[in-house]
Amino acid sequence: MSLELSQLVAGLDELLAVQDFQDYCPNGLQVEGRSRVARLMTGVTASQALIERAVEWQADAILVHHGYFWKGEPQPLTGMKGRRIKTLMQKDISLIAYHLPLDAHAELGNNQQLAALLGIQVTGVMDSPAWPLGLVGELPEALSAADFSHLLSRKLKREPLHLAGHARPLKKLAWCTGSAEGGIFRAAQLGADAYISGEVSEKTLHEARELGIDYFAAGHHATERYGVKALGEWVAKQWGIEQEFVDLDNPV
């Protein structure tokens, strides 16, 4: 089966409520290819490697979390950026990307999908102007930091960096996937035992110790695999087209 590219994009825009977000990049259709989509490839980032996989698979469109045209980046289509877009245009492959709308979605979003993967019961949101996308929840039972670190490693297939801020067991958690280490302050305000994100800064160690909260840097890529994968599966179920998720390993 196949559907119009415009129908696919309109359906995703509506599902993810893109009009509600002020983002660092355009959400939705970023590069327009052929008018109908029968094969959709999904991945975290629209790298050249992912594009080449899409070419091999004869995909009509690529759906990602990290696309192009970020605020502050050079505008000319030269070098690496030019090569990526040139390949898409020459092969008539569309690029569709959703950033913050995919982080935030209440069912398919990165934060919800991470909770489901780890078995965390979501109890609320971080609920602050700076961190509107993060979630709060609880583990079924309290775990030691070592046991929770092992859970992250087993589920995400990546060893997390654990910064200890206390010695008590972990029960209440807060998290925001990707590059959101600054949310540790809001997590501490909410009384979380630990905060989870993807990346880490040098100052985060001192913040964890002084705020009395554990911090787990579990990988930007690793924490954001699951939203776009779930979104691709939703598309396949909704419209009956072929979809394939490609996980290109990234230790960051």
Image (tube, rainbow, N blue to C red):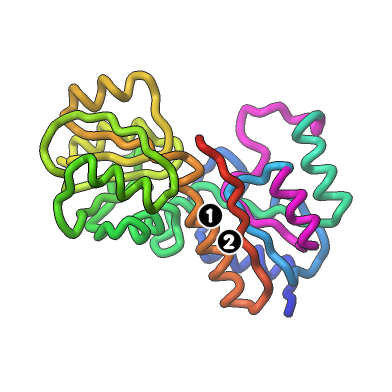
**Residue 49 picture quarter:** top right
Mark 2 Cα-neighbour bin, 10 Å: few <14, some 14–19, many ≥20? some
- Tell me the kind of residue under disc 2: Asp
Q: Secondary structure at mark 1?
A: helix
Q: Is residue 117 above or below residue 224?
A: below
Q: Is residue 212 above or below residue 191?
A: above
Rendered residue at 26%/31% (across/down):
185
Which residue, given by chain and number where applicable, does mark 2 sit on? 13
Q: Nearer the viewer, residue 116 or 131?
A: 116
Name the spot of residue 173 as percent of width and height, x first.
Answer: 23, 46
Q: Is residue 83 left or right of residue 30?
A: right
Name the spot of residue 112 as percent of width and height, x first.
Answer: 37, 57
Rendered residue at 18%/22% (across/down):
210
Q: Secondary structure at mark 2?
A: helix
Which of discs 2 and 1 lies nearer the camera? The answer is 2
Q: CA distance from mark 2 to mark 1?
A: 8 Å
Name the spot of residue 204 as percent of width and height, x first.
Answer: 32, 24
Which residue, given by chain and number where applicable, does mark 1 sit on? 19
Name the spot of residue 66 as percent of width and height, x first.
Answer: 59, 44
Mark before the other along the chain sequence, 2 or 1? 2
Question: Would you say the residues marked 2 and 1 are in contact, meaning their CB atoms lie under 8 Å apart?
Answer: yes
Q: Is residue 6 above or below residue 251?
A: below
Rendered residue at 51%/43% (across/down):
221
Q: Nearer the viewer, residue 103 or 177?
A: 177
Q: Which residues are magenta?
A: 49-78
